[in-house]
């Protein structure tokens, strides 16, 4: 498979501008392309498709990439089929996935990605690149007919991964507990991707980028930490 | 309607035993009853129905209430129809709601509650008492055919409500931001119920109990703080 993906935990890290911390990797992913199709369906904070797309234009156009929002195109399917590259931004994962189904672009995206079209996601856009949205942190603000996601990779991702806070008196489940509960009912690996981290996938190679290690959860095993440069190729094996 | 509900944010507060912080209110709710039907479907941490029920027995039997798990009964529907009182414990809200649907006890519970049977929930068990599970903090580890919940009250609840952490560098959404996103698509009020808090509902009266104020979110309005003793009766008006 000639996958060419960049799956980013968060669009914005503390103290940096939109996509700024990922500039080098974004440019590498989009190398040779001149335009990006942006999918604003996740609507963070309920922002309009136009406003969300404007924000992305502001970030990507100075780097030399023309951006159009998928809502500006007459046919979402055709827009995907003709895109040079696709970027799905963060927001609410349920709303995003519902809109991906509604606009019938799940299969078209899968087909293009299989053939090597660059795909980039941040937060919810990274979440939906996985096998299911079963490890999202978001509230289920709309119902979705299935939690099956784009399945561009055979594992799940938990973006904005948070370590348990030492000495916390909060009794709500930690992220790690929630992922363990996920693994009582689901088999695929889960990558806890801390803010500032990203996964770069080229064909059958996968690399962790950014300043942090990633926490990887396999069913019935103790969570493991992997740092940039470690071999995490097992994640691309089918589950 | 002769509702008789106790909706508790968390079963256990930091430094106290299971249900201990709610002892007085639990005893008041169950006054005059001798048994409780426990529904262990939310399976926190994947715990078995037997183990979860044993934990509840340990807490409630010293207070004079006999506890049976719904799984110990041949017919879940009949168990609900014959129960003196029902307690739904916390865990994963999606798994809980899926099992409520699968065992066909949604309507039987609604009917019994309308007629005054005491209902008690903690965490996920409090969440499913609301209009929908759209404001759960849990991961969607299983798919549910609908997010409509028991609708014992006409609003939603966010248990384990957390205030934004001042000075946090985390870029994931705060609880308040998530609830605002919920209100872009949903109309019902949301009660942010901090750990240690509970709602006591008797007929058409509703009271906030416990040491904290509650944060109440209405669509298109600024969040409001209400403390014990404040009039929050508007929550019981239909939305």
Image: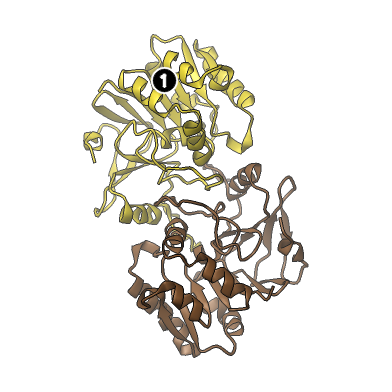
Chain colours: A yellow, B brown
The outermost residue toward the right is: B231
The C terminus of chain B sits in image quarter = bottom right
- Is residue A152 among the parts visible in the rendering? yes
| Residue B173 figure quarter | top right
- Disc count in the image? 1
Question: Residue B224 at what x, y percent from top left?
Answer: 73, 55
Q: Nearer the viewer, residue A30 or A229?
A: A30
Q: Position of residue A176 (x, y in %)?
A: 38, 53
Question: Which is more toward the observer, A22 or A89?
Answer: A89
Going by the image, does A66 lie left or right of A224?
right
Residue that appears at 29% across and 29% down: A207
Q: What is the chain identity of the residue bearing mark 1? A: A
Residue under numbered circle 1: A24
Against A125, residue B201 (above or below) is: below
Q: Residue at 48%, 12% (x, y): give it.
A: A35
* Residues packed near mark 1 inside 10 Å, few (<14), some (14 to 19) or many (20 plus): few
Q: Is residue A123 visible?
A: no
Q: Is residue B189 above or below residue A154?
A: below
Q: Position of residue A82 (x, y in %)?
A: 44, 13
The quadrant where residue A54 appears:
top right
Looking at the rendered structure, the secondary structure element under dot 1 is: helix
**Residue A57 against residue A159 in the figure, above or below:** above
Identify which residue is drawn at 59% across, 73% down. B113
The quarter in which the N terminus of chain B is drawn is bottom right
Query: Is residue A51 depicted above or below B181 in this figure?
Result: above
**Along the line of sight, the residue nearer the viewer: A218 or A131:** A131
Left-right relation of A25 to A39: left
Q: Where is residue B174 drawn, in percent x and y?
A: 57, 47
């Amino acid at each position: 498979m000639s996958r060419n993906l960049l799956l980013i935990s968060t669009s914005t890290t503390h103290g940096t501008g939109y996509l700024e911390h990922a500039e080098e990797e974004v440019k590498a992913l989009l190398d040779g392309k001149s335009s990006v199709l942006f999918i604003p369906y996740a609507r963070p904070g309920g922002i309009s498709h136009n406003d969300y797309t404007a924000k992305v234009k502001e970030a990507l156009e100075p780097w030399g990439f023309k951006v159009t929002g998928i809502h500006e195109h007459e046919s979402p399917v055709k827009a995907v089929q003709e895109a040079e590259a696709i970027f799905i931004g963060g927001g609410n994962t349920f709303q995003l996935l519902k809109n991906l189904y509604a606009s019938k672009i799940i299969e078209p995206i899968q087909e293009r990605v299989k053939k090597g079209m660059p795909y980039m996601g941040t937060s919810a856009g990274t979440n939906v690149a996985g096998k299911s949205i079963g490890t999202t942190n978001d509230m289920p603000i709309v119902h979705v007919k299935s939690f099956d996601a784009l399945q561009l990779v055979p594992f799940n991702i938990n973006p904005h991964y948070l370590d348990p806070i030492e000495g916390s008196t909060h009794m709500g489940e930690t992220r790690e507990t929630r992922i363990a509960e996920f693994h009582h009912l689901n088999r695929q690996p889960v990558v806890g991707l801390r803010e500032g981290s990203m996964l770069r996938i080229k064909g059958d190679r996968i690399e962790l980028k950014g300043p942090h290690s990633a926490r990887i959860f396999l069913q019935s095993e103790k969570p493991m930490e992997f740092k940039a440069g470690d071999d995490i190729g097992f994640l691309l094996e089918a589950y």
